[in-house]
Amino acid sequence: MVDTVQNPPPVLRVQNLKKHYVLGSSFLGGKTQTVYALDGVTFSVAERETLSIVGESGCGKSTLGKVVMGLTPATEGQVHVNGRRIDNLSVRQLRPLRREMQMVFQDPFSSLNPRMRVEDIIAEPLVNFGLAKTKAEVKERVAALLDQVRLPRAAMKRYPHEFSGGQRQRIAIARALAPGARLIVCDEAVSALDVSVKAQIINLLQEVQEELGLTLLFISHDLAIVEHLTHRVAVMYLGKIVEIADRRTLFQAPRHPYTQALLSAAPIPDPSRRSQRIMLQGDIPSPMNPPSGCRFHTRCPYAFDRCRHEEPMLSPRTNNNHMAACHLDELPAGPVAAASTLEPA
Ligand code: SF4
């Protein structure tokens, strides 16, 4: 465990989770390559809590969501939902547990069947899980779910293409809530929306979380959104968590250079951050060939020799719930204008 011991037991617990994709075929001596998409991730999320997973694209955060949901099998490690280990279950064994965990994707247009009416889209999980027996019962539940996501009941008879992006995301949320899920994984759920619509959907998520006692795993690259919504934040880089802390600590006292760089580049209204902007050099390295030692050393403005050879482990910083993976206990003070010119090891 890298964060607090939760009491009551966490709704979601992930231990040393790995997802490695092997590309190519070794048949007849063919060459294979391994993509280390997730490489040993550990965290837990308590009931009614929101944990946000942030990082650049390619850091493994979306893979994490898919492995947690059982949409792709883990290579190693464990996923526990409501105290039950689920990563070793077959698709058949997992099916009834899907009631407890649902996912909201970035693009509701592709996640909602365009040929189904909203009523049938939301009713589908109710029927599949046997949660409503009669047509009248189904209709009543769908109407209540539309109320919950602040859509008019007349929406029932319409098709997804008749709605705006924000309204479609409300429909996707209603569908996720339909089976009574306690854990919702939101994968870039507001990224495709306009700024004002984003805020409305975030408010909706917070309201339904409060009303229903939901636990949210919120995967996003948008730190400004995350700051509004989350209780804790985990920062990922090349398949690993490099820092995890409660929202206030992470935004006010980040201890990993990568977190500092992400925050310095985020459009969060704080004039003091602008003068301390950290310009990272280059792109995120390929997860097929992650750098030795600290995976961030090829872009870190503070990298030194040890960083090339020795991998830093997550360890406590400002308090026991604040962990960062960096060889430096304290980062040098003052603005950093340019990234290190260290060549990759
Ligand atoms: Fe930078 Fe070294 Fe810390 Fe990695 S361990 S973040 S390279 S200072």
Image (cartoon, rainbow, N blue to C red):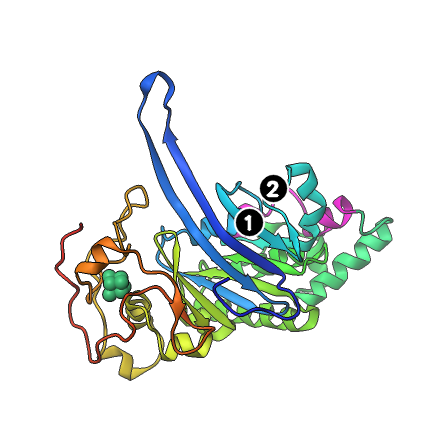
Residue at 37% across, 80% down: 252
Name the kind of residue labelled 1 in the image: Gln
Which one is in front, 252 or 133? 252
Q: Are marks 2 and 1 in contact (CB under 8 Å)?
A: yes
Residue at 44% across, 54% down: 61
Q: CA distance from mark 2 to mark 1?
A: 8 Å
> Does residue 120 appear in this view?
no
Instruction: Assess whether residue 119 is covered by the magenta stretch.
Output: yes
In the picture of the structure, the residue carrying the numbered disc 2 is 88
* Among the two numbered marks 2 and 1 on one chain, the one whose residue lies closer to the N terminus: 1
Instruction: Assess whether residue 222 is covered by the magenta stretch.
Output: no
Ligand 1 positioned in quadrant: bottom left
Left or right of 246, for residue 26 = left
The image position of residue 147, as x and y in percent, is 71, 66
How dense is the environment of label 1, judged by Cα within 10 Å: few (below 14), some, or many (20 and up)? many
Name the kind of residue labelled 2 in the image: Asn
* Position above or below: 175 against 329: above
The residue stretch that appears in magenta: 107-129
Q: Which mark is residue 78?
A: 1
Residue at 72% across, 61% down: 145
Left or right of 180, for residue 168 = left
The image position of residue 109, as x and y in percent, is 54, 49
* Position above or below: 38 against 1: above
The image position of residue 114, as x and y in percent, is 60, 44
Per the image, label 2 sits on a secondary structure element best described as loop
Q: How many marks?
A: 2
